Amino acid sequence: MPHSHKHPSMIKSIFVVLGLGLPWLGLAQNKVADPRPYAASITEEDLRSHLYVIAGPEMEGRETAMEGQRKAATYIQEAFLKLGLQPGYDRSYQMPFPVYRDSLADARFVVRGKAWGLNTDFQPMMQVNNTATQYFSEVTCVGHGIVDSSRNDYGNIDVRGKAVLILDGAPAGYRTPRPGYLSPSGIYGKIQAAQEKGAAAILLVGAGFPRRSAGPNGNMFTELFKPVQAVNVYFISEQVAKSILGSEWEIVREKGRSGPMEPKAFPTETELHFRKETRFLQSTNVLGVLEGTDKKHEWLVITAHYDHLGKRGDVIYYGADDDGSGTVGILEIAAAFAQAKADGKGPRRSILFMAVSGEEKGLWGSEYFSDHPTIRLDSVTSNLNIDMIGRIDTERKTADTTQYIYVVGDDKLSTDLKPISEAVNLKYTRLTLDYKFNDPNDTERIYFRSDHYNFARKGVPIIFYYDGMLKGDYHKPTDTPDKIHYSLLAKRARLVFHTAWEMANRDALLKRDLPQPQMQ
């Protein structure tokens, strides 16, 4: 459940009764600069103009390391250049990071001289497999291959260097002690257990054969060199399992349905061949710097991810809200700050505006930056991250649906954050700040799912601005620019601008006095 908070009108009335002004809340009192004229420059028209390009068909869905993403990076770079921002990566606006992609060259599965069909009878798990040819004289069946605090399907059998055959799913009545993708009864949980046991290959018996081809290309990834190599995994049909186990296959299948079974080695002649080719790709974060004045060696970082899901065939996933809205938001916020600086009212701290890519793949761009920072992270007062601020949560039924924003992480890492955020909102924008996703028991785990997390894990205080889930449009081709609520997008962007103005101009860096929440 979201944390409770007072309505802005209630807070205002308290100030009136007590005779206290907003300076009591600790807002920076910059006597020279009034931020409101610059906030007013963030307009619906400019946001719309940018977004119809960023989320237009020419950008092809902006998939990381693909041509559409490169076009979007160029557009953002040119916008930063036009605003007079300095390059944020040495002399370049673009910070490259490596991306790799595997393509399948060959895969064969042979049992006692019989070759089984790719996708018809077996399918290699390309995202984990390494090129290898393996010959096994026996295969060890370990039932469902589940290992948890109360169960060990491997028993006392040593499977180091061996091939293990594992049944898919779980037996009747099994209750997992750990839900999620690493559940002991899930595919990745079983792979992890087999790898820890030292298995050389996993043959995972699954339904649904023949299967649709996984395609010639595997998933993209960023970690080519690994301290530990994964075990090779092959999904196999029941017919292939029967060719290995012989007449005992039916007994194994029936026993597996009801509960644990004794592991057993079966003699065989099984050949596994897998070969892939790895291609080097590249993606970039786009960095623009607005230099500060008397505190220019301290920083504020404002981020949004500009990548999305790309194309599936001829179908474009436009990503207008996710996160075209955040991307155009930082362009407009940067423009407002650039104008203030041109008028001699620039921020005291330097501001790094960064559009990151690879977020949809696993927060890659922000992870790379946080591990290879261009600035000292201990000199960063805060990261303000914007990911989806142009739509209305389809699950939200309260009366304030056109006047809200989810604020995430302001109660973590720094006790300075929430008072500043609320005071700024009260003075300038008066949106409803919803703290639903600050709940430590949030099942969506929103705090860990966008680029701010890679700053938070390094100790940088963060605020994440978010509009919620878009039922029917989230990660669908229908997330298009015509569905954006531009007046609400502008108001939310102005809230981020005013919050950034305060953080860039206040006397002290934000305290770092709260513990880091741990990902579970």
Image (spheres, rainbow, N blue to C red):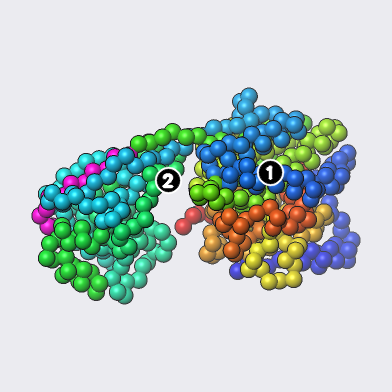
Q: Which residue is mark 1?
A: 53
Of the pair 292 and 159, the residue shown nearer to us = 159
Outermost residue toward the front?
314
Residue occupying the point 55% across, 51% down: 315
At x 28%, y 55%, the residue is 120
Image quadrant in which the N terminus is located: bottom right
Residue 61 in view in this figure: yes
Q: What's the amino acid at mark 2? A: Asn
Q: Which residues are magenta?
A: 265-276
Disc 1 packing (10 Å; few <14; some 14–19; many ≥20)? some
Mark 2 surroundings within 10 Å by alpha-carbon count, few (fewer than 14), some (14 through 19), many (20 or more)? few
100 sits to left or right of 115? right
Q: Residue 268 magenta-drawn?
A: yes
Left or right: where 149 falls relative to 179 = left
Residue 502 visible in the shown view: no
User: Looking at the image, which residue is at 54% across and 47% down?
Assistant: 310
Q: Main secondary structure of the magenta part?
A: strand
Residue at coordinates 50% horizontally, 49% vertically from top-left?
A: 313
Q: On the picture, is 149 further left or further right than 317?
A: left
Decide if residue 184 is on the left or right side of residue 290: left
The residue nearer to you, when weighing 270 against 172, is 270
Residue 337, compared with residue 478, is above or below; it is above
Q: Amino acid at mark 1?
A: Val
Location of residue 404 in the rendering, given as x and y in whole percent from the top left corner: 73, 62
Asked if the residue under mark 1 is in contact with the one under mark 2, i.e. CB atoms within 8 Å, the reply is no
Residue 219 circle label: 2
The label nearer to you, 2 versus 1, is 1
CA distance for labels 2 and 1: 27 Å
List x then y, in percent, for residue 300: 68, 40
Decide which of tag 2 and tag 1 comes sooner along the chain: 1
